[in-house]
């Protein structure tokens, strides 16, 4: 049994690395297509305003090739770091679907984390490709974004707490009550946070914009749900019942 | 409050686990969010190197 924190943490790192590689591949094969189109838009307007931040200019800090590799590497690093935090949160959780198998607990947790730190901010502040953001507002936008992420995690925690409080109720009543509460809290968050401060520049084609946003969402889902699934596979004794006794297989 | 939950609450989370988690969050921050707040000038290089990943993961970017 994976009952020590260290064994859970190692599996978290492995799950994060695997999901990160999968997400990086989605980036290379899917997300890079609209990124390339957006960079072309940015390049087309280069002569006009040379201000500060260029991606395509001659005196760039990092070459395009390095940015593609670095971007993928960044996703893998984030995957590993998130996997570690994910495993710690999992080890600390006492009431999260406590009556389910380790795999379903981990899968549900990955899906919930995806909803909280990826889907919710994506709905409120949709991802933008290069050539959209205004450098002047980046710190304000970052603060808003992190605020929504924190609010999302609070909702997940509170949903778990509420489910525990309603343990005396029947299963359908309990599920309905928790879902309604989550929907209400989500609506409050979406209404309470201010609208995205930047307008989309007129020269950004709307299909590039949305191709990018959907690719980004697919990639985030791969990362977070992937961590939940892989971590669940790695920690659930049921997934290696057929093979030798658990202890052997390590991350 | 029995079965899997029982074996689960048997997981003892040591104190260093929190340090490890904070480290994980710091790494995530550096890769995804650092815009000059913590590293100053060096952040520009970091920012550009991880550029595509930041955009792809939906983080606000310049």
Image (cartoon, coloured by chain):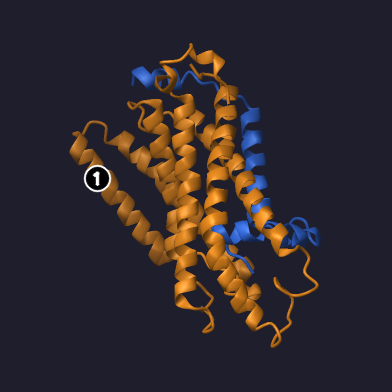
Q: Quadrant of residue B38?
A: bottom right
- Please tell me how crowded label 1 is: few (under 14), some (14-19), or many (20+) other residues with Cα within 10 Å: some
Chain name for mark 1? A
Question: Quick one: A141 or A157, which is closer to the camera?
Answer: A141
Residue reaching furthest top?
A245
Say if B22 sits above or below B52 in the image. above
Q: Residue at x 33, y 50 (%)?
A: A182
Q: Position of residue A76 (x, y in %)?
A: 61, 45
Q: Can residue A209 be seen from the camera position used here?
A: yes
Is the residue A228 above or below the residue A124 in the image? above
Report which residue position mark 1 lands on. A177
Query: Residue A146: x and y, percent?
Result: 55, 57
Specify the quadrant of the image occupied by residue A247: top right
- Whether residue A143 is visible to the viewer of this picture, yes or no, is no
The secondary element bearing badge 1 is classed as: helix
Picture quadrant where residue A62 is located: bottom right
Direction from residue B20 to residue B39 in the image, left or right:
right
Q: Colour of chain B?
A: blue
Residue A217 in percent (x, y) is at 46, 57
The quadrant in which the C terminus of chain A is found is top right
Q: Color of chain A here?
A: orange
Residue shown at the point (51%, 21%) measured from the top left: B11
């Amino acid at each position: 049994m994976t009952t020590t924190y260290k064994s859970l943490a190692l599996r978290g790192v492995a799950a994060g690395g695997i999901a990160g590689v999968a997400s990086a591949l989605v980036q290379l094969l899917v997300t890079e297509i609209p990124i390339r189109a957006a960079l072309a838009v940015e390049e087309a307007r280069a002569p006009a305003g040379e201000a500060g931040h260029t991606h395509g200019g001659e005196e760039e800090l990092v070459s395009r090739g390095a940015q593609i590799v670095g971007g993928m590497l960044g996703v893998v690093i984030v995957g590993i770091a998130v996997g570690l935090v994910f495993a710690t949160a999992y080890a600390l959780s006492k009431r999260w679907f406590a009556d389910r198998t380790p795999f379903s607990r981990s899968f549900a947790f990955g899906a919930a984390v995806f909803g909280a730190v990826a889907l919710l901010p994506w709905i409120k502040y949709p991802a933008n490709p290069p050539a959209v953001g205004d450098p002047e507002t980046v710190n304000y936008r970052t603060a808003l974004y992190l605020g929504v992420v924190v609010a999302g995690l609070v909702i997940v925690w509170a949903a778990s707490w509420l489910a525990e409080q309603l343990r005396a109720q029947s299963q359908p009543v309990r599920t309905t009550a928790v879902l309604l509460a989550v929907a209400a809290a989500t609506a409050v968050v979406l209404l309470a946070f201010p609208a995205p401060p930047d307008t989309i520049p007129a020269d950004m084609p709307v299909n590039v914009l949305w191709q990018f946003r959907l690719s980004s969402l697919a990639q985030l889902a791969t990362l977070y749900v992937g961590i939940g699934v892989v971590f669940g596979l790695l920690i659930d004794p049921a997934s290696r019942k057929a093979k030798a006794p658990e202890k052997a297989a390590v991350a | 409050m029995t079965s899997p939950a029982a074996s689960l609450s048997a997981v003892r989370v040591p104190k260093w686990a929190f340090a490890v988690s904070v480290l994980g969050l710091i790494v995530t921050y550096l890769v995804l969010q650092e815009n000059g707040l913590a590293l100053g000038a060096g952040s520009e290089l970091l920012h550009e190197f991880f550029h595509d990943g930041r955009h792809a993961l939906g983080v606000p970017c310049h």
